[in-house]
Amino acid sequence: MSIAEISAKLGARAESFCRAYFAEGHRQGDYWQVGDTSGAAGRSLVIRLHAGGGRKAGGWTDYATGEFGDLIDLLHAKLGSRSLHETLLEAEHFLGHAPLPKQRVSSRASKCSSTATTKRIASARRLFAAGKPILGTAATVYLHSRGIARFGPALRYHPRVYFRGANTGPDQPSYAPALLAKITDNRGNITGCARTYLDPITGGLADLSNPKRILGQLHGNAVRFWSGSNLEELIVGEGLENTLSVGTTLPEFNLASCLTATHLGLFIPPSGIRRICIARDNDAAGERAAQILSAKLGTVGIECRCLVPKLGDFNEDLLAFGKDGLRDTLLSAMKMEGLSN
């Protein structure tokens, strides 16, 4: 089975998975609650047991640490596996002994879920269409403050984007300016819009608990920046700023930003790609995502190599070492891997 198939099969058996590996947790509605990835008792980590609202079964979030992912990620953390291969062997062993439960989702519920996803994609398209070029806006100020100079038609700016906060409701709407990033599939269709809410006074991120949010469908897709050269190679990164930092120093390369570590592992490259550089963050989540993506793409003959920052991510490297310093480091690493054009 492919990694995507294993992940889907684990999600279909999410409750059995939780009872097998996270027995100290408990069910709360359509979720399983447990303390952390070790399986300790508690409520910080939440696992979705059934698909709904456009979200897949098996997705999890640890609200104490901000980590999230699918059940392969969770199993990898729980086992403390030395390799992704070891984790996948355990997953296949579990699947061989866990029968598929009876389908509890009605066809009507499934149709409602599909309709909800379609509506979110339509909303994302309307929002991006309402944006304007970023030059001369707070979005440019923000990106320049991060040392970023690689832009493109995938970016737009909107001075007043709605957001839902802890103290907002239908009668108290809240708005903030936002950098918009167009999420597309391999055919160029817009499937979502990433919003980075900004503080118009400081030029930095807005003072929100979560200033970066995604509307629409990201699974397998990305925010893309094309240089028009070497269509067989692609640099795939995690966060938008992380990817654009690499692109600032390497303007001749095509880029795809998956926005999160989880979606980095789920990325589906366009046809014709032969080599991919994975520009991951320097943390455990980035390492797992790169392993998952490399293993998946290796089965279809795409060569993958990792680019790892010296600091936490490539934007930190860009700010610390400068454009020329980071470029020299990246080109040297890519030359060693045989990926420099």
Image: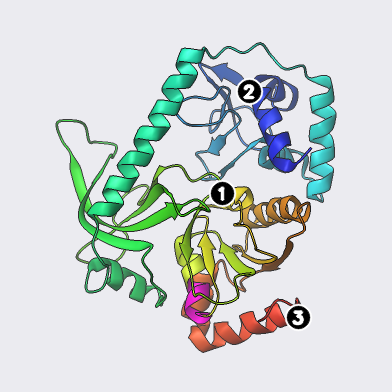
The quarter of the rendered structure image containing the N terminus is: top right
Residue 263 is tagged as: 1
Residue 170, how many percent across, how many down?
19, 30
**In the rendered view, would you say 272 is above or below 116?**
below
Task: Please check the rendered image and state whether residue 259 is part of the magenta-colored stretch, yes or no.
Answer: no
Residue 336 is tagged as: 3
Amino acid type at mark 2: Gly
Residue 93, how many percent across, how many down?
85, 30
Q: Are marks 1 and 2 in contact (CB under 8 Å)?
A: no
Dot 1: element: helix
Q: Is residue 181 visible?
A: yes
Q: CA distance from mark 3 to mark 2?
A: 46 Å
For image coordinates 48% across by 24% down, the residue present is 52
**In the rendered view, would you say 185 is above or below 319?**
above
Q: Label 3: how many residues lie within 10 Å, few (<14), some (14-19) or many (20+)?
A: few
Q: Are marks 3 and 2 in contact (CB under 8 Å)?
A: no
Tell me the residue that label 2 is attached to. Answer: 25
> Where does the magenta region start and end?
245-251
Amino acid type at mark 3: Met
For image coordinates 65% across by 52% down, the residue present is 289
For image coordinates 57% across by 34% down, the residue present is 59
Query: Extreme left residue here?
Result: 171
Q: CA distance from mark 1 to mark 2?
A: 26 Å
Residue closest to the eye, 244 or 268:
268
Dot 3: element: helix
Q: Is residue 24 visible?
A: no
Residue closest to the eye, 115 or 178:
115
Residue closest to the eye, 8 or 285:
8
Q: Label 1: how many residues lie within 10 Å, few (<14), some (14-19) or many (20+)?
A: many
Residue 213 is tagged as: none
Judge from the rendering whether residue 264 lies leftward or rightward of residue 206; answer left or right.
right
